[in-house]
Amino acid sequence: MRFPPKKKRAAEVLTRLQPLYAGLTTGLDFKSPLELIVATILSAQCTDERVNKVTPVLFARYRSAEDYVEADPEEVESIVHSCGFFRNKTKSIQGMSGALLERFEAEVPHTMSELLTLPGVARKTANVVLSHAFGVNEGIAVDTHVQRLSGRLGLTKEKVPAKIERDLMKLVPRDSWGRMSDLLIWHGRRVCVARSPRCNVCVLADICPSAVVIRYRS
């Protein structure tokens, strides 16, 4: 079976998934750039649902970068414990907050280069913050869902997130970079799940090379 070229396939992904997930952006609850960057740090190797159960307590207790810096690490750890890697995440949150105080007047910066100087912030976190807190498209956030779906859809053969991001950025218009990430994440959660993808109800099945393989195996 022949499939559309990658660029046309990527355009079809955007077109077909948008109506399904209209109104859905990041799965993390936040009211400010600081809350989003903290929640995104906590979401590493953890579900958004779990993070959203923790952050109401955390955000009520710590409302500013200064609050996090002055916090007792053990108290922060006790709140975020269920998110996993709680010591490292607490260290990153406090280190990030200290950097905001020292270099950015306690405000979360809105450029990729500046965000990447913050402890605990790599490209995925920076892309999430830029897209959802500031409406800036500097790249495509690649999490496990984006990595899995972009591979299944044949949009990339790469396995490293940074290389996957570069491939996707070539295929998707810049003004849709953030949206592409959101759509793949939601579709990965609801339809194209890791172990048993629901190809029989997937609107992308006819343009997905992996759907053909899965159908023949079943």
Image (cartoon, grey):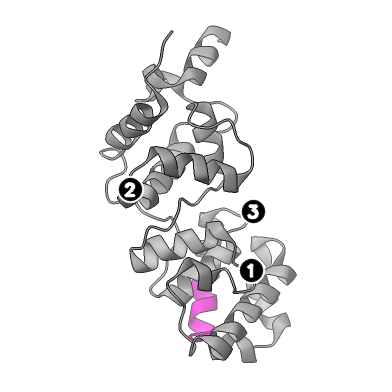
Is residue 217 left or right of 17 when viewed as pictured?
right
Instruction: From the image, tell me which residue sits under label 1.
Output: 120
Disc on the earlier residue, 3 or 2: 3
Q: Amino acid at mark 3?
A: Gln
Residue in the picture at 52% in, 67% down: 39
* Residue named by callout 2: 176
- Please name which of the two marks, 3 or 2, marks the residue nearer to the observer: 2
| Rendered position, 170 above or below 133 | above
Give x and y (percent) for residue 67: 56, 89
Magenta extent: 55-65
Q: Mark 3 = which residue?
A: 45
What main secondary structure does the magenta stretch of the protein show?
Answer: helix
What is the distance, in whole Å, between disc 2 and disc 1 at their CAs?
26 Å
Name the secondary structure under disc 1: loop
> How packed is label 3: few (under 14 Cα within 10 Å), some, or many (20 or more)?
few
Q: Position of residue 8 (x, y in %)?
A: 33, 28
> Residue 187, located in which quarter of the rendered image?
top left
